Image (spheres, grey):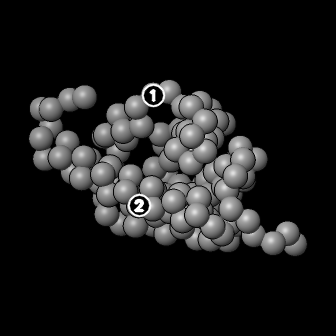
Amino acid sequence: MNPKHDITSLKDIKLLVDTFYHKVAEHSLLAPIFNERLGSEWVPHLEKMYTFWQTILLQELTYTGAPFPPHARLPVDETHFNDWLTLFSETVDSLFTGEKADEAKWRAGKMAEMFQHKIAYFKNNPLNIL
């Protein structure tokens, strides 16, 4: 087995994203949310996630779009976010070590926190639309 290294390339990003979403697809709480939303469109979602994390972690500007709007009306709560973040952190830790690996976990935590607050806002203010 290869020793763990830091996230340094698109190949590393793809390994992280593919491994993580494989776990999501098997998770009892998260899989139904993703399957309902994505249906048979997992591949385009994964490709978008490659560019998102490539832009965030490697500063290679390949992602375009706004990450929050597709999530605004998801039927999720703190439990979903906690499970998502736990799976993400476990995946990073199982594959990588280093500064970028730590940054990936930190950024995922900040995104989860922000998304959770924004989703709660839209649930409590249903007349506000994006």
User: In the image, which disc is placed on residue 12?
Assistant: none
Q: Residue furthest right?
A: 1
Q: Residues within 10 Å of mark 2 (few under 14, many from 20)?
A: some
Asked whether residue 90 is in view, the answer is yes
| Image spot of residue 45 (x, y percent) | 58, 37
**Dot 2 lies on which element?**
helix
In the displayed structure, would residue 18 be above or below residue 62? below
**Dot 1 lies on which element?**
loop
| Image spot of residue 121 (x, y percent) | 17, 46
Q: Residues within 10 Å of mark 1 (few under 14, many from 20)?
A: few
| Image spot of residue 56 (x, y percent) | 52, 44
Q: Residue at x 41, y 61 (%)?
A: 109
Q: Residue at x 87, y 72 (%)?
A: 1
Residue 74, image quadrant: top left
Identify residue type, mark 2. Answer: Gly
Q: Residue at x 24, y 53 (%)?
A: 117
Q: Estimate the spatial distance between the alpha carbons at disc 2 and disc 1, rounded to whole Å.
A: 20 Å
Sequence-first disc among 2 and 1: 1
| On-image quarter of the C terminus | top left
Identify residue type, mark 1. Answer: Gly
Q: Nearer the viewer, residue 38 or 115?
A: 115
Q: Residue at x 36, y 39 (%)?
A: 68
In the displayed structure, would residue 14 be above or below residue 104? above
User: In the image, which disc is placed on residue 109?
Assistant: 2
**Residue under numbered circle 1:** 65
In the displayed structure, would residue 130 be above or below residue 91? above
| Image spot of residue 127 (x, y percent) | 12, 32
Looking at the image, residue 29 sits to the left or right of residue 14; the answer is left
Looking at the image, residue 111 sits to the left or right of residue 41; the answer is left
Residue 112, image quadrant: bottom left
**Do the CB atoms of the residues marked 2 and 1 lie less than 8 Å apart?**
no
Residue 101, image quadrant: bottom right
